[in-house]
Image (cartoon, grey):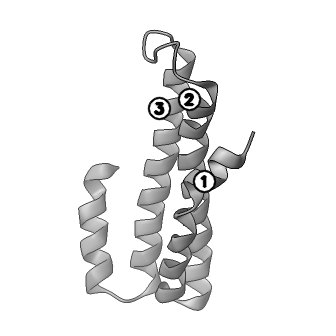
């Protein structure tokens, strides 16, 4: 998924329509979900993650990418209904994802 980001970024910069914005959001959504899955898998296996990693950090490692994925998932219908610029502006909601994840207990 990471390898697709330069391609969809190029497509999005060449075309100011909702479809490229939605495509970019779908790639980042998929990347974020996979990152959350990697953290979820690693935190359950003592060989992959040291036991001294705090539980809060383990939880945040899963929740933060999933919150980012949620933001990008929500930006797809926004881009479709209100245009590509509106969808892209919603991506700013991903900035506080780490803080929100830290507050969830």
Taking the spot 25% from the left edge, 52% from the top edge, the residue there is 3
User: Judging from the image, what secondary structure is the residue with disc 3 in?
Assistant: helix
Quadrant containing the C terminus is top right
Left of 73 or right of it: where is 35? Answer: left
User: Judging from the image, what secondary structure is the residue with disc 2 in?
Assistant: helix
Residue 83 vertical position relative to residue 33 in the rendered view, above or below: below
Q: Are marks 2 and 3 in contact (CB under 8 Å)?
A: yes
C-alpha gap between disc 2 and disc 3: 5 Å
C-alpha gap between disc 1 and disc 3: 20 Å
Q: Position of residue 15 (x, y in %)?
A: 32, 86
* Mark sitting on residue 40: 2
Residue receiving disc 1 = 99
Taking the spot 48% from the left edge, 79% from the top edge, the residue there is 88
Residue 31 vertical position relative to residue 54 in the rendered view, above or below: below
Q: Quadrant of residue 7?
A: bottom left
User: Judging from the image, what secondary structure is the residue with disc 1 in?
Assistant: helix
Left of 55 or right of it: where is 10? Answer: left
Residue 57 vertical position relative to residue 88 in the rendered view, above or below: above
Taking the spot 59% from the left edge, 64% from the top edge, the residue there is 71
Residue receiving disc 3 = 38
């Amino acid at each position: 998924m990471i390898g697709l980001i330069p391609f969809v970024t190029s497509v999005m910069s060449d075309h100011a329509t909702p479809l490229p914005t939605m495509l970019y959001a779908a790639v980042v959504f998929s990347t974020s979900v996979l990152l959350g899955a990697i953290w979820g898998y690693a935190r359950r296996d003592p060989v992959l993650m040291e036991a001294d990693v705090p539980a809060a950090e383990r939880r945040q490692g899963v929740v933060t990418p999933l919150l980012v994925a949620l933001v990008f998932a929500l930006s797809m219908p926004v881009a479709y209904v209100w245009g590509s610029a509106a969808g892209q502006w919603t991506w700013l909601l991903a900035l506080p994802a780490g803080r929100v994840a830290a507050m969830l207990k």
